[in-house]
Image (spheres, coloured by chain):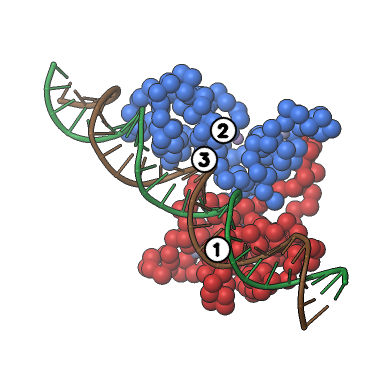
Chain colours: A blue, B red, C brown, D green
Amino acid sequence: MGNLRDTSQRRVILEELVRLKTHPTANELYEIVRKRIPKISLGTVYRNLELLAESKVIQKLDTAGTKKRFDAMTGDHYHVRCVKCGKVDDLDFPFLNSLNKSATLAGNYEIISHRLEFEGICPECRSQRLVGKNCVERESNSG
Amino acid sequence: MGNLRDTSQRRVILEELVRLKTHPTANELYEIVRKRIPKISLGTVYRNLELLAESKVIQKLDTAGTKKRFDAMTGDHYHVRCVKCGKVDDLDFPFLNSLNKSATLAGNYEIISHRLEFEGICPECRSQRLVGKNCVERESNSG
DNA sequence: ATCATTAATAGTAACTGTTACTAATATAGC
DNA sequence: GCTATATTAGTAACAGTTACTATTAATGAT
Ligand SMILES: [Mn+2]
Ligand SMILES: [Mn+2]
Ligand SMILES: [Zn+2]
Ligand SMILES: [Zn+2]
C-alpha cells in the first residue's frame, strides 16, 4: 500500500470503512473505530482518511451538506441522499461515460470529470412519512 | 417579494448578485456590496442570501468545496468548476429531465432532484498552463 | 405626519467541521 | 536491539457560517 506504515489505527479505520456501506463522515467513523481502539484520536481518523484517499485506496465524497463523507468503493458510481434522514446510499445506475465529452463540446472548458448526486426519499423514511418518528434529521437539508 | 421588507442592504445585495455571473460566495459578495454600503455587516449578507434563497428569488448552490455559492438564476442549469482557479461558470448544457425518473426505477429511493456538476479547466487557466502565474487557487481542490 | 409595531441591522460571540502543531510513541529496515 | 522517522494522542488554531443582542428603520394605522 505504497509507503504507508501498517499501524493498528490505520488498519482498523480501513477495515471498518470497508465493512460499512453507509458512506460515513469522519466523525461517524471515529465513533465506530473508538469501540475497538478507545484511545484513538479524531485527528488520526481525519489524517488517515485523507492519506488513504490520496493513495486512491478509498474515495472522499463531496456530497451536499457541510460534511465530507468517505467511501471504500473507488470505482465510478453515483449516490443518492435522503432529504429526510441525510443517509447516503449507492445507486445502481449506469455511469454516463459520454457526459464529459458532451459537456466539453457544449462550453469552453476542458471537462475532466463530473459529479452527479441524486436527492430523494429512502424507503425507510417513505414508510414513516405520516408517523415522523425514528427518522432523525442528520444534517440541515440545504436546498 | 413575499413578506420581506425593502431595505437598502437587501436591495443592493440582490442587485449585485444579479449583476455578477460569477456565483460568488457570501464573503465575495460582501466585499462587493461593501463598496456601496461600507458599514454593512457580513451577517447581513449571509442572512439575506439565506432569506432570498428560501423565498426562491435566488438559488443557493452546493458546489464542491467548503464554501456555499449563490446564483441569481433560479432556472435549472448545470455548472462547471475550474479545478485550477476554483471559478464556477454556467454550462450551456441541456437539462436531463429524464434522469430522475430513470434513477427512481434503478433503486428504491423516490428521486426528487439531482445535482450535476462538471470539473474542468477554464480557458484562462488552460492558456496559462505553462506559465502558472495570474492563476490564483481559490479553494483547496478536493478530490 | 406621528406613532406603535416589529422586522432588520451592525457588531460580535459562538459554533461546527477540519487542519495544524507538538512532544511522545511505534514501525520498518538494518 | 538500535536508529531513523512515520505516526500517534491531545490540543490549539482555523474557516465558514450561524446565533445573539441592543439599536435602527420600514411598515401600516391613526
Ligand atoms: Mn458509494
Ligand atoms: Mn448558474
Ligand atoms: Zn431517509
Ligand atoms: Zn481557471
| Amino acid type of the residue tagged 3 in the rendering | Lys
Alpha carbon distance from label 2 to label 1: 33 Å
- The image position of residue A48, as x and y in percent, is 41, 34
Where residue B59 sits in the image (x, y, percent)? 69, 59
Q: Residues within 10 Å of mark 3 (few under 14, many from 20)?
A: many
Task: Report the residue marked by disc 2.
Answer: A24
Element under label 1?
helix
Q: Mark on residue B42?
A: 1
* Label 1 residue near ligand 2, CB within 8 Å: no
- Subunit of mark 1? B
**Does D10 appear above or below C13?**
above
Residues at marks 3 and 2 on the same chain: yes
Q: Is residue B95 visible?
A: yes
* Residue at screen point 68% across, 66% down: B72
Residue kind at label 1, given as amino acid type:
Leu
> Residue sitting at 71 percent across and 41 percent down?
A83
